[in-house]
Image: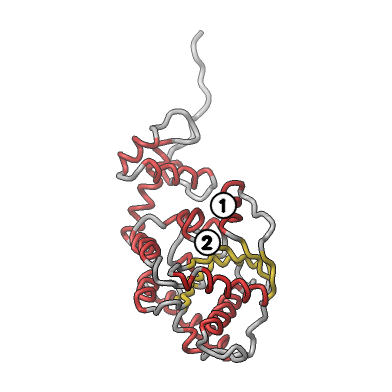
Amino acid sequence: MDHIQQWLQTLHDRKISNDYDRIVIVLGEEGNGKSTFILGAMELWYQILGRCPADTHPDPDRLLDHVVFDDPQAFRQQVLDSDAKDPIAAMDAAHILHKKTAMHGEQIKTEKSLLDIRIENFLILLGYQDWADVPDQLQRRRAKNVLHIPRRGVVHGYSRQSMDEKYESGDWPDPDLVDTFPALDGRDLWAKFNEMDRERKEERLEEDQEPDAEDVAWQAKAEMAVYLVKPWSSDGMTQGDAGSAVGYSQKWVSDRCQEWERGELEPELLQAIPEPQHGGVMPA
């Protein structure tokens, strides 16, 4: 991780130390080593901060205190409780901030928290499995780097400029940085992290699975907005009129229509409309 370490050192010296924070998206499919990389990067960050000698590993329990799993409230509390220059990591950030649900409920509060912490000098590492899950606010401006893990042990780094190219064209340009990272197998840090991860997943399975009423209402309005606009035909409302009808902005309706075009939102209203019956004879 020599290149990652050099980048982190430069980030610390030129940005974090000058009263800027940094949000970094870490992309990697399940099993590619996203959590391994994030933990390794946090260890390097601790060494850069001088919280442990360069030739030793930080205390696992102390490092894992900076990890949030899947709770938006816990993430916001972590932001409030953290000290200047602390790392904050969410291995599965889609449970905290997700593109489809980033405009309501707990996630509105979390997005506002990200806007309010610019002077706190944090290094925030948000793990996602897919670029499509990352909220627009992070894709377009708030996040400044992406570290993509195409396969286990390899990481590609992208700058804000490269992220803009991806957002506009849909394709990633050549990476600005390429590096490798080691496995953590056999280390106390990895064993303790896996135990915490397993416990949290078990808790999540035991929690009430009933959908949140606010989430259900948001989803219903999203589907209604797309149905009113009818982007598949020329018979629908304008996006502004549809926004007024469901209580959201024209931009919000536009985002939902784009999700429909990408196949991410399928209004159940469409499924309830029967197909027209063909046949019969029309008199001449």
**What is the CA distance from the residue labelled 1 to the residue labelled 2?**
10 Å
Look at the numbered disc 1 and give the secondary structure of its residue.
helix
Report the residue marked by disc 2.
144
Furthest residue in direction top, as rendered: 284
Q: Is residue 63 left or right of residue 54?
A: left
Is the residue 154 above or below the residue 284 in the image?
below
Q: Mark 1 is on which residue type? A: Asp
- Neighbours of disc 1 within 10 Å: few (<14), some (14-19), many (20+): some
Q: Nearer the viewer, residue 117 or 243?
A: 117
Please name the residue shown 45% across and 77% down the image.
85
Please name the residue shown 48% across and 89% down the image.
61
Q: Position of residue 87 (x, y in %)?
A: 48, 77
Q: Mark 2 is on which residue type? A: Lys
Q: Is residue 148 left or right of residue 106?
A: right
Image quarter of residue 128: bottom right
Q: Are marks 1 and 2 in contact (CB under 8 Å)?
A: no
The quadrant of the rendering that contains the N terminus is bottom right
Image quarter of residue 176: bottom right
Is the residue 255 above or below the residue 12 in the image?
above
Q: In the rendering, which numbered label is found on residue 164?
A: 1
Please name the residue shown 59% across and 80% down the image.
40
